[in-house]
Amino acid sequence: MRRAGTIAALIAAAALMTACGSSGDDGKAERADKGAPTSSPKPASDGQDRTYAVSFEVGGKGKSSVYYNLDTNHSEQVALPWKKSDKLTLNSTERKVGITVSVVPGPVMLSNGQFAAAPCSITVDGKKVAEDPGGADGKHMCEYTLR
């Protein structure tokens, strides 16, 4: 029963991420959905655009779904472990407000045969800024606000 509840929670989280959707803009959008505030360095007051190197990682073995928000919302079926790196450029206004990037890993089978969220992390400009160990008791996602 607990396995079914965990899977249902992961599917619900994925549905929420998908429901936020994107604008349908196929180009690199310069914004993302608003998320829970997280700590981030103070924005520079120089009024310049800034480009960030963002990497998402999801651990585990086998195949799973991964939902992530970088330039827009994305969903992929992937082989684990998985890594996605890209660049995101924010203008001065976006840097003042902050743009949240996130990754929600799908379920993986644990060594005890139960399903639970895979571990995840986010790295920005070479520094790990968010991490979740996965399993049945984690947040089941990683998120970070760029500024």
Image: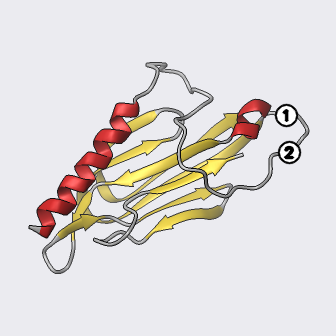
Q: In the rendered structure, are the residues bearing label 2 and label 1 in contact, judged by CB atoms less than 8 Å apart?
A: yes
Above-or-below relation of 93 to 118:
above
- What's under tag 1, amino acid-wise? Gln
Residue at horizontal 80%, vertical 46%? 43
Pair 2/1: label in front: 2
Residue sitting at 76 percent across and 39 percent down?
96
Image spot of residue 81 (x, y percent) = 36, 62
Q: How is the image coloured?
A: secondary structure
Q: Position of residue 52 (x, y in %)?
A: 68, 45
- Let me know if residue 140 appears in the view: yes
Q: Amino acid at mark 2?
A: Ala
Is 31 positioned to the left or the right of 136 in the image? right
Quarter in which the N terminus is drawn:
bottom left
**Which residue occupies 38% across, 52% down?**
104
Q: Which quadrant of the rendered structure holds the C terminus?
A: top right
Left or right, 114 with respect to 43, comes to left
Which element carries disc 2, helix, strand or loop?
Answer: loop
Q: Position of residue 78 (x, y in %)?
A: 30, 50
* Residue at mark 2: 44
Q: Label 1: which residue? A: 48
